[in-house]
Amino acid sequence: MIFLDLLFPPKTTCIICKTAIKTGYLCDKCKSTLKFIEGNRCNICGKPIDYEGTCLDCLEHGHEFKQNISPFEYDGVVKDLIGRFKYFKERELAPFFADYMADAVKKMDWPIDVIVPVPLHKIRLDERGYNQSELLARELSYRLNIFMSKALRRVRNTTTQTALHKEERIENVKGAFKVTYKDTIVGKNALLVDDVLTTGATLDECAKVLKENGAKDVYVVTIATGKNM
């Protein structure tokens, strides 16, 4: 094995532990620590639940989008990787996440016509240097062979949603988005792309604006979600 490694040295390193690997993004050990959403999940928000059907929150409040799918639970290694992707400029994680997101979307067999990333406000974009949702959307566009449109613009620099309760999140994003390239979404089924689904307030507001401007159904794909989010 050592002799073979000398002849054919590993080409990259695991994105988690930095162990040398020949292909892919993760070593076998780290891959085994990823927490996928398996078993029952809500058929609307996609959060893991202990029974078949729709979670109580979706039954009570509903959503503007038709369905969300997330390959991962927002926990452990995945949570750490999302933090690195969003806040520590590790853009190379976009294709890693997109591989799993694209597979999840394909399994859903949704009739998607256009992919739309959730936008950042210009101030936040200038601070971060990139929109993580747009990076994911571009990777998904390539993998799914579906046109991506920056059809949404964030017109208000909202407070970060992280520390807000559900009602505050809903109020925080009201009127925060507008459609810019309307011709790209009129009469079409849109796939909204974001990193994490928590309460769904941001995604609901985006879906609402898209539908008010002529989009048909709006579906959602995110990297992760969780039972108690």
Image (cartoon, rainbow, N blue to C red):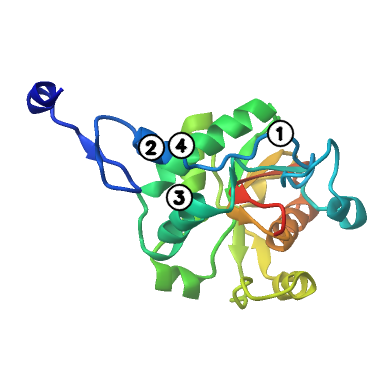
The local secondary structure at tag 4 comes to: loop
Choose mark 2 or mark 1, whichever is in front: 2
Q: Label 2 amino acid?
A: Lys
Q: Dot 2 corresponds to which residue?
A: 29
Q: Label 4 amino acid?
A: Ser
User: Residue 142: image x %, image y %?
Assistant: 46, 34
The residue shown at (48%, 31%) is: 143
User: Residue 31: image x %, image y %?
Assistant: 43, 37
C-alpha span from label 3 to label 4:
26 Å
Q: Check whether the beta carbons of the residues at disc 2 and disc 4 lie within 8 A of each other.
A: yes
Q: Is residue 14 left or right of residue 130?
A: left
Q: Dot 3 corresponds to which residue?
A: 135
The residue nearer to you, when weighing 5 against 212, is: 5
Q: Check whether the beta carbons of the residues at disc 1 and disc 3 lie within 8 A of each other.
A: no
Q: Residues within 10 Å of mark 4 (few under 14, many from 20)?
A: few
The local secondary structure at tag 2 comes to: helix
Q: Residues within 10 Å of mark 1 (few under 14, many from 20)?
A: few
C-alpha span from label 1 to label 4:
17 Å
Q: Is residue 184 left or right of residue 40?
A: left
Q: Earlier in the sequence, mark 1 or mark 4?
A: 4
Q: Earlier in the sequence, mark 2 or mark 1?
A: 2
Choose mark 1 or mark 3, whichever is in front: 1
Any mark on residue 32, and which? Answer: 4
Q: Quadrant of the N terminus?
A: top left
C-alpha span from label 1 to label 3:
29 Å
Q: Check whether the beta carbons of the residues at disc 1 and disc 4 lie within 8 A of each other.
A: no
